[in-house]
Amino acid sequence: MTSLICEGNQLSVLDLSESTVLTSLLCGNNYLTALDVSNNTALISLECNNNQLTALNVSNNIELTTLHCNNNQLVTLDLSGNALLEELRCYNNHLSALHFSENSALKEINCHDNQLTELDLSKNGALGGVNCRNNRLFELVLSENTALEILNCAGNRLTSLDITKNTLLESFYCQNNPGDGISKFSVKAWFDNDSIPEGFYPNLPDHPNYQLSWQYNDNWISVDYQKTI
């Protein structure tokens, strides 16, 4: 057996110890509290989202390119042995740290709604999409992520942001950050307030999901795009 799809059942236990040639496992939307994939060294795709996992060890899964473990109860996630990983969805967990220095192949990171205070993406030049909204980030450095097309960093603790190197960006959300705490969230970019690219927040005021400003400590904060190149 190389592929197993058992999503949307009521599984509380899943024994895969004998499935050593398994390359694809989809076991989301069950009641799993534990998942042992240590013997499944051929796994390329693992989707175990929407369970009750408190831990997940993928150190033996060196062929892994896709990992969806969102909507669990994970407090740690070690990806140092997954050099081929391209797509990670680990949102809605209890993660306080993620390290991607060994994951240079990553193209998508979706880690929103965790407890991250820092996010180092300096070794991830292939990234096309990052969604890290609703964490506790004080800083986000994107100078090495020149392939980035989608960025959502809303709902963090950012005071400003530099996207001057991210000239391929097509979608950008940054609302609900403190900015200077008085009136502005400063964004250094390759354009200014008069030349905001189409699709960028907040240049579509008629769209219900786009906020032109937000409130922080009784002050209204709005984005100030500053052209620097």
Image (cartoon, rainbow, N blue to C red):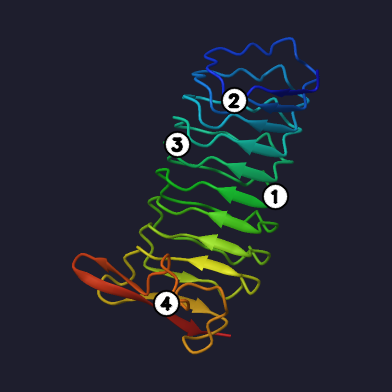
Report the Cα–Cα distance between label 4 and label 2: 44 Å
Report the Cα–Cα distance between label 1 and label 3: 23 Å
The residue pinned by badge 4 equals: 205
Please identify, in this view, whether the residue under mark 1 or under mark 3 is nearer the observer.
3
Circle nearer the N terminus (3, 2)? 2
**Picture residue at 70% right of the left edge, 45% below the top:** 86
Q: Amino acid at mark 1?
A: Ser
The residue pinned by badge 3 equals: 93
Q: Amino acid at mark 3?
A: Asn
The residue pinned by badge 1 equals: 104
x, y percentage for residue 212?
Answer: 37, 75
Query: Which residue lies most toward the bottom here?
Result: 194
Quarter where residue 62 is shown: top right
Circle nearer the N terminus (1, 3)? 3
**Picture residue at 47% right of the left edge, 83% below the top:** 226
The residue pinned by badge 2 equals: 57
Are there few (<14), some (14-19), or many (20+) residues within 10 Å of tag 1? some
x, y percentage for residue 70?
Answer: 52, 37
**Which image quarter is the N terminus in?**
top right
x, y percentage for residue 2?
Answer: 80, 22
**Which image quarter is the C terminus in?**
bottom right
Circle nearer the N terminus (1, 2)? 2
Please identify, in this view, whether the residue under mark 3 or under mark 4 is nearer the observer.
4
Q: Amino acid at mark 2?
A: Asn
Is 105 placed above or below 175 here? above
